[in-house]
Image (spheres, helix red, strand yellow):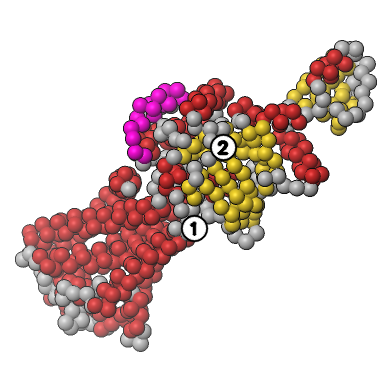
Amino acid sequence: MKLLIRTEFKRTFRSFILWASIIIGLTILEITLFPAFKDSISDLEAMMSTFPESFLELFGLTQGGLDLTTAYGWFGMEGYLFLLLIGGSYAGILGSGILSKEEDDKTIEFLLAKPISRNQVLLGKAIVVFINLVLLNVILFGVMSIIFASITDYEFETTLFICLGPLLLEVLFAAVSMFIGVFMTKSRTVMSTSLGIVMGLYFVEIIATVTDKLDFLKYFSPYEYVNAISVVKDHSIEPVYLLIIFGVILFSGFGTWFFYNRKDISV
Amino acid sequence: MINIEHLTKYYGKHARGILDLSLEVKKGEIFGFIGPNGAGKSTTVRTLLNFIFPTSGTATVMGLDILKDTVEIRRHVGYIPAEVNYYDDMTVRDFLLYSVGFYEGVFQERMNELVEKLELDMDKKIGDLSFGNKKKVAIVVAFATEPELYILDEPTSGLDPLMQSRFFDLLEEEKRRGATIFFSSHVLSDVQRICDRVGIIKEGRLIKIETIDEILKTKAKNVRIISDNLVLKENGNIVNLKQNLNTYTFTYKGDMNYLLKSLQNYNIIDLSIVEPSLEEVFMHYYAKGDEDNEVVD
């Protein structure tokens, strides 16, 4: 299995570099914009007071929310969402391609003719996805620490949570995408479905936030599980949300294992 | 070596793969598995390697169950797929090293020897290779680990005659080493050239298992004669006789010496004797199968 992991890692490396560059580049840009923005903060606050409450809530700017006068608060409002959306898309694409691409390209026939079980293939590929996501966030943590430390008082815990939140969301999306990849073997279809889920759920989040009546929808929005106020300001994730996250990851993992071991691999 | 018992595979509810297929491949033999496209050859192969699950029936490979002992079976099997699909972005070298890396043992020397014999360029990307060259990579993949059993699905398609000949030399070497070979093909001449016994499959059913000698005995030839004074009539040996001016075509089932001697009495302008097409051989077996009203195991 080590051989499979090593080779898969090499095969996903190029796309890793591409996505990591985008995510890290945007993060650097976002944080370094803060000093310039800080000077005009009072203008912005005045402008914001004219916006409806629900709109501000969407950005975590209501009372008890993010403090825009700090670099972390600023990043929580501006950059954090980027991290969730772009990181989530990367995870969706990575998870959906890792199984389905082998079937789409028909290379699975090569792999399954080797002395390796379907479980080993699954586990090896899941490990590669997980390593990619962890590595992305570890690098991000390192870069963020340097940039934050250079412009403001460095907060270790806040920086850690800014990276942990997206990582949880990414693992969740990757697990669900892998599960979908068991049933759909055209990698493009799986990819669009996964991206559809990543983006679609963000709209669920918007609706859940702006309308009080549909508040229950927040349980269906992974973005709510790791929302900026909890993660960036309070350094916490509600237990019920953590339970849902791990529940869905476990369910997807079990489903992937169950169905992949029973399906006909017809190329 | 391979023991298939009443194996049936349906894709979905109605699409037929194979039906109640039973056969045995003995250790050390080259078993030809022949049939037209869509007959169920690849379905059989894929079931043996557990890419797909049988609807009913059982099979063992080297005494190991195809569903329970999949990994152990694959450890001892060299497989050439009908359609070669490997990782386009890898070089031949990286890919071959990846492939042999799954097995315990050192196979680099054997791999290099095969690459040389088949004249493969190790530095090329898989995606840049022609169909025939991809097939050569598949041959190296299957042969490099010196397996006990080869499962070959249309292995010669795409190979030029020189490479086909080298491939057959390799197969004979492996047979001498004691390997067993399951050779699936729709090319009759390939199977004739190398196989000890042949199983004929059509529309998912195995309709006959025979030795090559038996096949040759029963096999008819297509004859075309141009002559200005020939007189021919259909009989037990001459069937499907057609005449167009001076050209006679027929299927000849009898002793070739007798035919040639008889022709000496006539003025022959042109003569050709060719093997019947595979379809014709199948028709022959199908007709026979209907007469016997049975499916032979």
Q: Residue B84, position in %: x, y?
A: 50, 39
Q: Residue A247, position in %: x, y?
A: 32, 72
Three-letter amino acid code of the residue under disc 1:
Lys
Residue denoted by label 1: A263
- Above or below residue A129? Residue B154 is above
Q: Please indicate whether residue A96 sits to the left or right of residue B164 in the image.
A: left
- Above or below residue B115? Residue B78 is below
Q: Nearer the viewer, residue B144 or A55?
A: B144
Q: Residue B37, position in %: x, y?
A: 64, 42
- Above or below residue A217? Residue B220 is above
Q: Residue A5, position in %: x, y?
A: 31, 48
Q: Nearer the viewer, residue B57 or A120?
A: B57
Residue ID at (62%, 61%): B13
Chain designation of label 1:
A
Chain designation of label 2:
B
Specify few, some or many for label 2: CA neighbours under 10 Å numbering under 14, 14-19, or 20 or more: some
Specify few, some or many for label 1: CA neighbours under 10 Å numbering under 14, 14-19, or 20 or more: few
The answer to which quarter of the image holds residue B234 is top right
Describe the element under mark 2 as helix, strand or loop: loop
Residue denoted by label 2: B26
Range of magenta residues: B103-119
Q: Please indicate whether residue B184 sits to the left or right of residue A86 in the image.
A: right
Between marks 2 and 1, how big is the CA–CA gap? 30 Å
